[in-house]
Image (cartoon, helix red, strand yellow):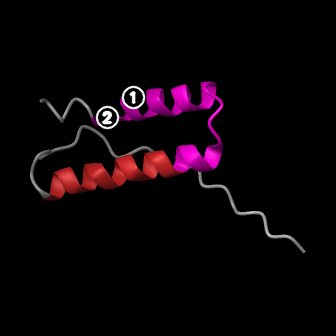
């Protein structure tokens, strides 16, 4: 399995776009992308990916609603 080609910015963006088109909430998308970013960090740490082709996708976190 070629993991280097699996973790690039366009793949992350395609996945995020797919989730948005599927009606997935932004909080769920943030959690899924955060998990992928963490997994990519693990792969780098364990030397499964030596030189990632790009930085992980930036996650647009939304602020939680705090009732008054």
Q: Residues within 10 Å of mark 2 (few under 14, many from 20)?
A: some
* Residues shaded magenta: 7-30
Residue under label 1: 10
- Tally of numbered discs: 2
The quarter of the picture where the C terminus appears is: bottom right
Residue 12, located in which quarter of the rendered image?
A: top left
- Residue 58 shows in the view: no
Asked if residue 37 is positioned above or below residue 64 in the image, the reply reads above
Q: Is residue 6 left or right of residue 49?
A: right
Please state the horizontal and vertical placement of residue 7, each as a whole percent of the image.
Answer: 28, 36
Q: Provide the secondary structure element on which disc 2 rests.
A: loop
Residue 20, located in which quarter of the rendered image?
A: top right
* Main secondary structure type of the part rendered in magenta: helix
Q: Residues within 10 Å of mark 1 (few under 14, many from 20)?
A: few
Residue 8's tag is 2
Please state the horizontal and vertical placement of residue 13, each as a whole percent of the image.
Answer: 46, 32
Please state the horizontal and vertical placement of residue 66, each as a whole percent of the image.
Answer: 80, 70
Residue at 45 percent across and 46 percent down: it is: 33
Residue 24 within the magenta-colored segment of the rendering: yes
Residue 65 within the magenta-colored segment of the rendering: no
Residue at 46 percent across and 30 percent down: it is: 15
The quarter of the picture where the N terminus appears is: top left
Please state the horizontal and vertical placement of residue 38, each as a whole percent of the image.
Answer: 33, 55
């Amino acid at each position: 399995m070629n993991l280097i080609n699996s973790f690039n910015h366009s793949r992350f963006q395609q996945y995020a776009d797919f989730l948005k088109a599927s009606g997935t909430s932004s909080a769920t998308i943030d959690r899924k992308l955060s998990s992928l970013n963490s997994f990519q960090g693990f792969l780098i740490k364990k030397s499964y990916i030596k030189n990632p082709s790009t930085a992980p996708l930036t996650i647009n976190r939304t602020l939680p609603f705090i009732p008054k």
